[in-house]
Amino acid sequence: MRGYITIDSERCKGCGLCISVCPAKVIEFSHRYNSKGYHPAVYKGDGCIACGFCYLTCPDVCITVFREVQKKVNVKV
């Protein structure tokens, strides 16, 4: 399964739990500070497998996971 995530960088306190549990290693710390003075987690881009581990471990409910639906095509021969 493939997908992507969004991270609310203003709510994120940069605890790093999502980074440590991501099996696809697609989350990292931002080099910039948010308005609260934290380095929030950011999604690197391609490669998310939509497992939801980051969502489940985020104590501040900053992450939303989106799963891409695969269409099945039936081909008759």
Image (spheres, grey):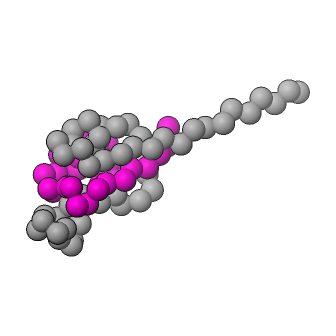
Query: Quick check: 72 left or right of 44?
Result: right
Answer whether residue 21 is magenta in the image. Answer: yes
What residue do we see at 77% from left, 29% from top?
A: 74
Comparing 61 with 56, the one in front is 61
Residue 70: image quadrant is: top right
What residue do we see at 21% from left, 71% from top?
A: 31
Q: Which residues are magenta?
A: 1-29
What residue do we see at 45% from left, 44% from top?
A: 66
Query: Quick check: 1 left or right of 61?
Result: right
Answer whether residue 35 is magenta in the image. Answer: no
In the image, residue 67 above or below residue 13: above
Where is residue 33? Give x, y as percent.
17, 70
Query: Quick check: 41 left or right of 38?
Result: right
Comparing 61 with 72, the one in front is 61
In the image, residue 61 above or below residue 75: below
Query: Quick check: 65 left or right of 40?
Result: right
Where is residue 12? Give x, y as percent.
20, 55
Residue 10: image quadrant is: bottom left
In the image, residue 66 above or below residue 45: above
Whether residue 49 appears in this view of the structure is no
Which corner quadrant holds the C terminus?
Answer: top right
What residue do we see at 37% from left, 53% from top?
A: 6
In the image, residue 77 above or below residue 44: above
Which residue occupies the extreme bottom position in the image?
A: 32
Which residue occupies the extreme right position in the image?
A: 77
Where is residue 21? Give x, y as percent.
24, 41
